[in-house]
Image (spheres, helix red, strand yellow):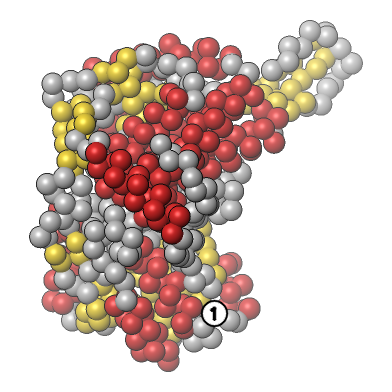
Amino acid sequence: MATTPRMKITYATLSADNEELQSAFDAALERARAALGETYPMIIGDEERTSNDTFEDRSPIDRELVIARFPTGTRTDVQDAIAAARAAYPAWRATPWRERLAILRRAADLISERQFDYAALMTLEVGKNRLEALGDVEETADLLRYYGDEFEKADGFVKPMGSLSPTEKTRSVLRPYGVFGVISPFNFPMALAGGPSGGAMIAGNTVVLKPSSDAPLSGWKFGEALRDAGLPDGVFNLVTGPGETVGAELQENPGIDGMVFTGSYEVGMDLYRSFTKDYPRPIITEMGGKNPAIVMKSADLDEAAEGVMRSAFGFDGQKCSANSRVYVEAPVAREFVAKLVEKTREITIGDPTERENWMGPVINQRALDTFSKAVEEARADGGTIEVGGETDTTRGFFPTPTVVTGLPLEHRLFHDELFVPFLVVGEVDSLDQALHEANDTAYGLTAGIFSKDDGEIRRFLDTIQAGVVYVNRRAGATTGAWPGIQSFGGWKGSGSSGKSGLGPYYVQQFLREQSQTVIGDEVPTL
Ligand code: NAD
């Protein structure tokens, strides 16, 4: 495994002109290619469970490339994984929290050490470019570190309370729930498997993870790091297979005490409604976005065009935070669009394992169909395709980054999440109109503004309905959050908890409060 060089790559890292880094990636890619096509087991307690029924994890870069094979898990596999997690729970909960943290910090260090190997596999598995994949892996490690640090800062969430008598001592203690189900999406296949699982485990819960069937290997590699860090069997379990069976069993099984889902609005809302049907259980759903950027005439238009281009087309528009609509003040609209088109034309598209390519494929045929349909619809409804609108399916699922103007602001393409590299730009007459349009959606994940006017910026910050907002960010108009820097969570239809991942209020959600009043001096330490 590669251990050098150590360089912190985040989503805001703009360039990777570092020979040492690139050759470490090349070497990791070679190792990754040599191991393609292996069959991996599910992780159920101390068992590595295989099955005769497997599915192929194919690369979106090249449909012929089988990355790995995984078992098609059944409801019985999920039931067994839940039983294993329940069996491991009492000992894990009773493990002093400093010891739990030490194990998870060790896992974080292993993930960082293996950054290149894990990122190379991820590039092949989901088609992220080199920097994006390195960022995803390092984010996973930093999520474990950050949640651990927050737990430590709060001294394990044991808080002395007041007393009504000299013989009585009371404290508030946050305690774990039991077993958490974690359902993760394809687009941050390690960070969004590892972050929620890590938060749950740091807090003393055990976990059953169901990774996306488009990206099970990155989830599995997270499990590998946990195992190598010495996590006790059963604390982390992983079952692969379709949402309709594996996901559904997690959702319905009463042995699951809490749930974290990250994925689309439709699946998330179904889960949200049904998970608490019989009795209250905590559920965090992090869902989609239709993230706006506002460009005012006071803006630095070059900065705006760069920030929008990076957020609209980074990882092919397949970030939940992707910028998918722009409201630009009419007097600068043409100039802004011209700059945006110019920057978009400069994007290098192709096999993302190659260092020069910034944009790769979308995840599957369904996503490519969504793209093609949006292009057709935009044309049919009078829109202008300023750039893009094409696809290349010779080997994989490659669309071109697309900018569309001329559609009415109420058009579906300004409102529905598409999750492909397709950006609509509309003209507005004022900030008020831009804010009205930006907020006129079921979603509320991220948003950005480009303006040099203090009053406009203040009004934007006061009025915008989104959990993550950015002002004048060239590195990404709406994208690029990092643990401990930008908390990341949605408002309205984008997220249920109001307490974001990557932030200071996250880990508490895996805990419930108990008030302990003890008469006398026998108060056990925790
Ligand atoms: P998806 O909803 O298709 O799948 C997410 C997960 O749910 C997968 O593991 C899938 O197998 C599982 N699933 C599918 N049907 C299920 C069912 N009936 N029961 C239980 N589980 C089921 O989403 P995706 O395509 O993998 O990811 C893209 C979506 O995720 C986008 O909408 C994006 O905005 C959203 N997302 C949101 C955030 C956030 O933090 N808000 C982060 C990343 C992605």
The quarter in which the C terminus is drawn is top right
User: In this rendering, does residue 504 appear at all?
Assistant: yes
Residue 370 to residue 427: above or below: above
Instruction: Return the x and y of residue 137 as percentages of the image width and height.
Output: 43, 44
Where is residue 77, by image quadrant? top left
In the picture of the structure, the residue carrying the numbered disc 1 is: 451
The quarter in which the N terminus is drawn is top left
Residue nearest the observer in this picture, 373 or 101: 101
What's the residue at 55%, 17% (across, down)? 93
User: In this rendering, does residue 415 appear at all?
Assistant: no
Residue 465 to residue 518: above or below: below
What's the residue at 44%, 54% (across, down)? 21
Give the residue at the far right of this rendering: 166
Dot 1 amino acid type:
Ser
What's the residue at 16%, 33% (across, down)? 55
Residue nearest the observer in this picture, 358 or 23: 23
Q: In the visual, does 250 lie left or right of 36?
A: right
| Badge count | 1
Where is residue 44, by image quadrant? top left
Mark 1 surroundings: few (<14), some (14-19) or many (≥20) residues within 10 A: many
Q: In the visual, does 424 lie left or right of 382?
A: right
Instruction: Return the x and y of residue 449 as percentages of the image width and height.
Output: 50, 73
Indicate if the residue with disc 1 has its beta carbon within 8 Å of ligand 1: no
Residue nearest the observer in this picture, 6 or 161: 6
Instruction: Return the x and y of residue 483 as percentages of the image width and height.
Output: 54, 48
Give the residue at the far bottom of this rendering: 331
Instruction: Return the x and y of residue 151 as percentages of the image width and height.
Output: 63, 33
* Element carrying mark 1: loop
What's the residue at 34%, 86% (across, down)? 338
